[in-house]
Image (cartoon, rainbow, N blue to C red):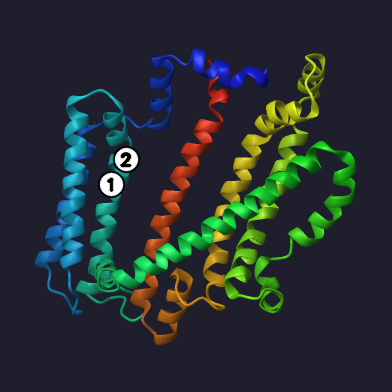
Amino acid sequence: MMLDAVTLSKKHRSPAAKKDEVQTKYWKPWRLTWNVLSLVTVAAAYFENVTVHSQELVNNGAYKGFLAAYFGYLLIVYGIGSVTKGKIRLYSGHFAQLNALLGVVLIGQDLLTEKFAMIKLPFFVSFAQILDQIKTDQKLLIASTWSSLGLWLVSFIVGTLIGVVLGLYMGRYRQFNYWSFPFLKVIGIIPAAAWMPLTMVIFPTSYLAEIFLIAFAVWFPVAFMTIGGVQSISSDYFESARTLGFSEFQIMRKVVIPGALPNIFIGIFTAMGLSFTMLVISEMIGAKVGLGWYINWAKGVGNYTQVYAAIVIMAILFSVIFSFLNKLQEYALRWRKSSKV
């Protein structure tokens, strides 16, 4: 029963079980051929950039530094993986093929853009140009990244809390669901961007309007998935909780919330993509700094290298946040692993 799931997870997870989890996550076998090939492709990308004549004037210093650091990172990881049998070996073996492909992609994009100019400026730029632009605008990009991260964090937390609370109550209480679900269906399907003209009138500052727009993009998928999670919980759990004398608060805390957590995280991950899209759109309406503002400003002056630079930073930021939420999900749902032991 999920009431004691967390306790069971702490007691029954053996080192062997943890090892099986890692092997399930990093399932591709370690092969020397792929490890060596990935090192070769990254090294080839470096020498291709150095030796092939460029058709475009580009400062490749940052790109060369990136390739050297990437090669050094792979060399260290593969070196440790070749002499150990732990997580690093599994990790290096699993991603070796992707690293080899990335080296090939880096060579291809450099040849097509900077070296042979088969796809040309201003709409197509090399990765070297993007890295050089990030280095040139690093102060402005750092300020924009922090501004966007702060705005997104506040908005995402607000939208998630609203979605979770509404979803729990709508999934648990029929009367609340009766009065609320029609509004959820009507209001929730309206794109957040459609509220943009109205928010500029209602809210006193553009910052509050941006928070509302991003939170609005988040709450609906979180609420909808939370409702489904609560309603999918077996009635046996509720009957057992009542037999044990649980109060309604204890039922919510020990049955409803743990049972709905898998669906809640599905809603959160779905809302992430929508929130980043709305972040860019909302920062275009009145922000004076931020990645969305930076993209809009760069597009206005026709500097697409700056646009790509902001996109790369947003991709990195999204990946870091996604990894953090994935770790949080693994920790919050650790009781599911214990049930499989």
Q: Quadrant of residue 250?
A: top right
Asked if residue 290 can be seen in this view, the reply is: yes
Q: Amino acid at mark 2?
A: Phe
68 left or right of 181?
A: left
- Does residue 233 appear in the picture of this structure? no
Q: Examine the rendered structure and indicate whether residue 87 appears above or below residue 215.
A: above
Q: Is residue 61 rendered to the left or right of residue 222?
A: left
Crowding around mark 1 (Cα neighbors within 10 Å: few <14, some 14 to 19, many 20+) is many
**In this view, 185 is above or below 51:** above
- Mark 1, secondary structure of its residue: helix
- Residue name at image x 18 percent, y 29 percent: 82
| Of 29 and 5, the residue lying toward us | 5
Image quarter (top left, top right, bottom left or bottom right) of the N terminus: top right
Measured from the top left, where is residue 97 in percent x and y? 30, 42
Numbered tag placed on residue 111 in the rendering: none
Q: CA distance from mark 2 to mark 1?
A: 6 Å
Q: Is residue 51 left or right of residue 285?
A: left
Image coordinates of residue 43 in percent, x first then y, are 15, 52
Left or right, 126 with respect to 291, comes to: left
Residue shown at 43% from the left, 14% from the top? 14
Q: Is 271 in front, or is 170?
A: 170
- Foreground: 56 or 230? 230
Density class for disc 2 (Cα within 10 Å; few <14, some 14-19, many ≥20) is some
Which residue is at a point 61% across and 43% down the rendered structure image? 266
Q: Which residue is mark 1?
A: 99
Q: How many marks?
A: 2
Mark 2 and mark 1 in contact? Answer it, CB < 8 Å: yes
Numbered tag placed on residue 95 in the rendering:
2
Q: Position of residue 10 (x, y in %)?
A: 50, 18
Instruction: Look at label 1 and name its amino acid.
Output: Asn
Q: Secondary structure at mark 2?
A: helix
Q: Position of residue 244 (x, y in %)?
A: 78, 14
